[in-house]
Amino acid sequence: MSVFLESERLVLRPFADADLADLVALDNDPDVTRFINGGKPVSRETVRTSVLPRLLADHPVLGIRSYWAAEEKASGVFLGWFEFRPVADDDTAVVELGYRLNKTAWGRGYATEGSRALIDKGFTELGVERVVADTMAVNTRSRRVMEKAGLSFLRNFTGDWPEAIEGSEHGEVEYELRRADWARRR
C-alpha cells in the first residue's frame, strides 16, 4: 500500500478498485449522505462507474490524486475519504478541502486531524495559497471541523441544488484559510 500522508492516527492513501465495497457502504448510510443527497441510497453500479473513477483519477495539475482513502493507522479500518483538490485544472493556488467519514469515525477528531494534515502538506509541499471548504449552512458538525482545522467563515451563498433536500433552504456556507494566516498561527 502506498501512503500519501500519515498523521498521528490516520493513514491517507490512494484509492484502489478493492475499495468499492467500503465506498458503497459509505454512500449508502443515510446519516453520512444526509447533507449531500438527502440520505438517498446510491447503487453499487453508480459507485463503480461514477464515484470510484473520480476517486481514482490523478488531478491534471498535481499529477497525483486529489481524493484519499482514510484508514485508522492502528487497525487499518477504512474510515472514509478526504478531498484536497485544486479548484482549477491548471493551478494549485486554491484547493478545496472535503471529507466523508463513516459514522463510527464521527466525534473522534479524525476529520479535523486529516484536514489539518492535508492543509499543512498543501501549504508546505504543494504550492497551495488558499484552502476553501463549503457545506450546507445547517451542517453544524462539518462547519465545526472546518473551524477546528483553522478555516474561517467567509460567506453564505445559495447553491444550485438539482433537487432540494431538507435544510437546503438555509443555503450554504464557505470557509477559507490563506497561507499567510496559516503561517501566522503556526
Image (spheres, rainbow, N blue to C red):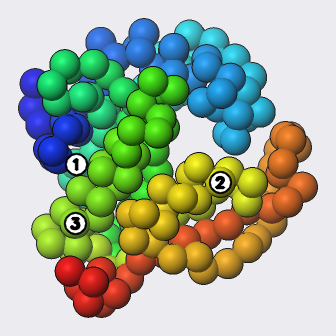
* Left-right relation of 54 to 28: left
Identify which residue is drawn at 15% across, 72% down.
Answer: 124
Separation of marks 2 and 1 at Cα, in angstroms: 31 Å
Mark 1 lies on a secondary structure that is: loop
Query: What residue is disc 2 on?
Result: 140
Examine the image and state in which quarter residue 10 appears: top left
The answer to the question of whether label 2 and label 1 lie on touching residues, with beta carbons closer than 8 A, is no
Type of amino acid under label 1 = Ile
Amino acid at dot 3: Asp
Q: Residue at x 65, y 54 (%)?
A: 140
Q: Quadrant of residue 69?
A: top left
Q: Which mark is residue 64?
A: 1
Horizontally, residue 19 falls left or right of residue 9, namely right
How many neighbours does mark 3 have within 10 angstroms: few (below 14), some (14-19), or many (20 or more)? some
Mark 3 and mark 1: Cα distance apart in space: 17 Å
Front one among 14 and 186? 186
Distance of label 2 from label 3 (alpha carbons)? 24 Å
Whichever of callouts 2 and 3 sits on the residue coming sooner in the sequence is 3
Front position in the image: 100 or 53: 100
Residue 54's tag is none
Label 2–label 3 contact, CB within 8 A: no
